Every structure is written in structure tokens, then in C-alpha cells.
Amino acid sequence: MRVGVVTFPGSNSDVDALNALAVAGVEPVSLWHESPDLQGVAGVILPGGFAYGDYLRAGVIARFSPVMRGVSDFAAKGGHVLGICNGFQVLAEARLVPGALLRNRSLRFAGRLVNIKPERLDSPFTHAATGAPLRVPVAHGEGCYYADEATLDELERSGQVLFRYVHDDGSPALDPDDPANPNGSLRAIAGVCNAAGNVAGLMPHPERMSEAILGTDDGMQLIRSFVDSAKAWEAGR
Amino acid sequence: MSEFRFAVNVLPKPGILDPQGRAVELSLPHLNVTTVSRVRVGRRVELTVTAATEPAARAVVDGLAKELLSNPLIEAYAVELLEATSSTVSDAGSGAGSGAGATRR
């Protein structure tokens, strides 16, 4: 099975994502931003980085690149799309997932290991997770998740909050100034999905924690979930 | 056709945390400034639109402001006309001495 990773000008975690897919046992396919052709892949990752220099707002220029036409069509057909870090920002700007990513509350770039916890284990992006906190790195300047209160309530009700920043004991870092919440995200939200459940974004980098040699392979729980869902989707077509 | 120069001023919506504005505020005591508050930091984009009329040009800018220059979830924008220049091409057709290249500010 083939799974694609988009490279925008300024992507820097595309190779990590391609590697994680290879570790997960699928054929990684590099997709170039200038073509809307997804080459028949069964799933798409929008990787981390600084697409188009993050000019104007992180993710907004990438949103209008030709490949995103292909990604939108793919998502509309029910294909699985995972946006990581900058990829999450692109999905949010493209309105493929709800909310927006604001400048970190601290105004500082956050580059360190954090704990996140899947909110539910029955989603296409988390079903292979154990449910325990995952140790994964963040590396971003604009990761403060924002949506208005009504939208946040709706996301909670509909199960669209997929990940929260948590303490070592698994309790959510709800206070935006809590150091376990690296960017001041509202309700400690680290990742969300669309209403249909097939498009998800998160700020931390599971692909950078995909092998024990990197410190932990916690991230593989999410990569495997995503890959299995892509596989099931392709088999069902 | 004429050329219309606009500025699009984009600011975080009221109630949206603006850490840049807060950082500027926190620097004020170092300048011994105590009379300034409610600082908001935004972005200003200037651009020129070629169009037949000012409303037509504004419609283009509005569309861009909503779609690209601002994120309506978190930002508000205001459009400001800076300058309108009637181009020599259209003036050539509308008779001599009609103010080719005239600029209105």
C-alpha cells in the first residue's frame, strides 16, 4: 500500500514522515506541492515545516497550492489525511479541520518533548494507541489552538478533540500557562479532527518518535493507527 | 481601466489573545510610559487593483481579505483606499485632456 507525504517549499519533516511510513511497513510516496495528482495513494500526510516561509500566516499560502486541490478532493471522498504541526496549520487554514493556530502564548518557539493523550481510542487516528500519555516532541511558534467557546463545546460533544496536552499522570494541562501546555492551547487541545472523522491535525510530531533508537517509538501508535485506517479505506473502495 | 491602491489592515479580533500586543504593553514601563494601554498588533497589506470602477476594485480586495489576507475566525480587517489613478489607456479613448495619469488622493 502507498501512502503520500506532501513536500511544500519549506517542509522539513517530510523525510521523517516518509521514514515513519516505511517503518510502519507501507510504501512511502513523496508528493510535490505543484501537482494536484496524489498518485493513487491510500492516505496523505501533510508534514511539519514552514511551508512558503510561513509568510502572511502559517499554512495559508500552502492552502492555495495545487496539491491541496487533490488533498481536498481526496478528503471529500473519505480518504484519510493527517496534518502534523505545519500540516495542521495548513488544514486549519484550508478549513478542513476546525479552529485556528495562534502565536504561542509565550511568544517563544516551543521545541521540546511534551505529553499528549488521545481523548478517544475509536478514531481512525488513535485506534492503535494504548491510551497512555505519549511522549512526543513539539517544534512550533504558532501552535496555540483557538476556536470560540461554542465551537469548542461542539467539538467536545462530537468527539472531535483527539489529543490534549497532559501531565505525566495523564491529567490535562487545562491552564494555558501550565508548562505542560507548550503553547497556551485552549482546553489543552493538541489535535482535532473534522466532523466526518477522516481528516485530523495535531501540533506534536509523532513521526519524529517512530523508532526506539530515537528515544521512544510512542509516535508509532498514531502512525500505525493512520496507516491501518488508510489500508481499511482502500480495501473498502 | 483605473488603478486603485488599497491598504488592508488586519487585527486580531477583540477577545482573541494577542501575545504580541501584550509583549509591547509589557515593554512600556521600561520606556517610563504609563498612559498607554490596549495595544493590539496586526498586519498591513498594501496592494494595487486594476478595475473599471472603485466598487469593482473594492470587491476584489474584500474577497482577497476574507480568503487570504485575514483568517475570519481570529482576525478582523478594514479596507482603506489610498489612491486612485486613471490610466492613460482608458483616457486616450475618452478624449484629450481628460487628466491622463491624474491621481486622486
Image (cartoon, coloured by chain):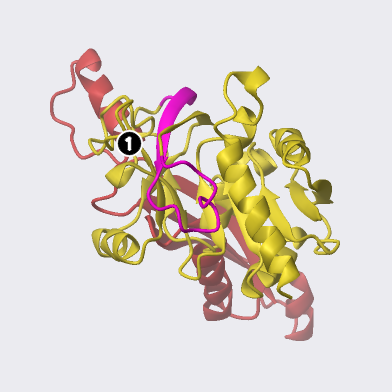
Chain colours: A yellow, B red
| Residue at 43 percent of width and 27 percent of height | A114
Report x, y in % for residue B5. Answer: 57, 60
Residue nearer the viewer, A234 or A29: A234
> Is residue A179 toward the left or the right of residue A200 in the image?
left
| Residue at 29 percent of width and 28 percent of height | A169
| Residue at 31 percent of width and 24 percent of height | A179
Residue holding disc 1 = A184
Other-residue count near label 1 (Cα within 10 Å), few / some / many at <14 / 14–19 / ≥20 = many
Residue A148 image-quadrant placement: bottom left
Residue B51, above or below A2: below
> Is residue A226 toward the left or the right of residue A5 in the image?
left
- Residue B104 seen in this snapshot: no
Residue nearer the viewer, B73 or A98: A98
Report x, y in % for residue A230. Answer: 68, 59
Which region is colored magenta? A108-131
Report x, y in % for residue A155. Answer: 34, 62
> Is residue A109 toward the left or the right of residue A232 in the image?
left
